[in-house]
């Protein structure tokens, strides 16, 4: 495995780690938005900050993926992440 192949492998592993975080954040968003409970909206600010931090991390990951050369060229498959909808 070349250095660049190893980099792409690690980037893919990080991506795999982030997807469960996206899913858990989506669950928290749904739970916090349940207006039938007394705690509705109490995590709004924290969830917003977590979502922004995760978005920023994912942006960095996508950028890293684009810079690592693939087969001697400076082209890599872009990393796409499912983003939770935040309203």
Image (tube, grey):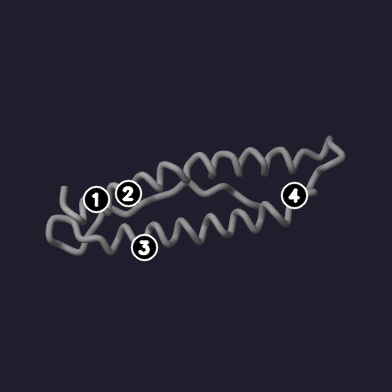
Distance of label 3 from label 1 (alpha carbons): 16 Å
Badge 1: few (under 14), some or many (20 or more) residues near its Cα, within 10 Å? few
Q: Quadrant of residue 64?
A: bottom left
How far across and how far down the image is residue 19, in percent?
47, 42
Q: Farthest residue toward the right?
A: 38
Distance of label 4 from label 3 (alpha carbons): 30 Å
Quickly name the residue at label 3.
Answer: 63
**Mark 4 vs mark 2: which is more N-terminal?**
2
Position of 40 with respect to 67 (left or right) is right
Distance of label 2 from label 3 (alpha carbons): 14 Å
**Mark 3 vs mark 1: which is more N-terminal?**
1
Q: Is 1 situated above or below 45?
A: above
Q: Quadrant of residue 75?
A: bottom left
User: Which numbered marker is on residue 6?
Assistant: 1
Q: Are marks 2 and 3 in contact (CB under 8 Å)?
A: no
Front of the two marks 2 and 3: 2
Quickly name the residue at label 4.
Answer: 43
How far across and how far down the image is residue 74, in percent?
20, 64
User: Which numbered marker is on residue 10?
Assistant: 2
**Mark 1 vs mark 4: which is more N-terminal?**
1
Q: Is 77 situated above or below 37?
A: below
Q: Are marks 1 and 2 in contact (CB under 8 Å)?
A: yes
How far across and how far down the image is residue 68, in percent?
25, 60
């Amino acid at each position: 495995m070349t250095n660049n192949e190893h980099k792409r492998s690690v980037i893919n592993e990080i991506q795999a780690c982030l997807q469960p975080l996206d899913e858990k954040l989506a669950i928290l968003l749904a739970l916090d938005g349940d207006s039938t409970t007394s705690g509705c909206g109490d995590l709004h600010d924290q969830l917003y900050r977590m979502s922004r931090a995760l978005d920023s991390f994912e942006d960095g990951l996508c950028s890293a993926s684009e810079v690592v050369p693939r087969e001697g060229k400076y082209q890599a498959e872009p990393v796409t992440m499912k983003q939770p909808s935040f309203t």
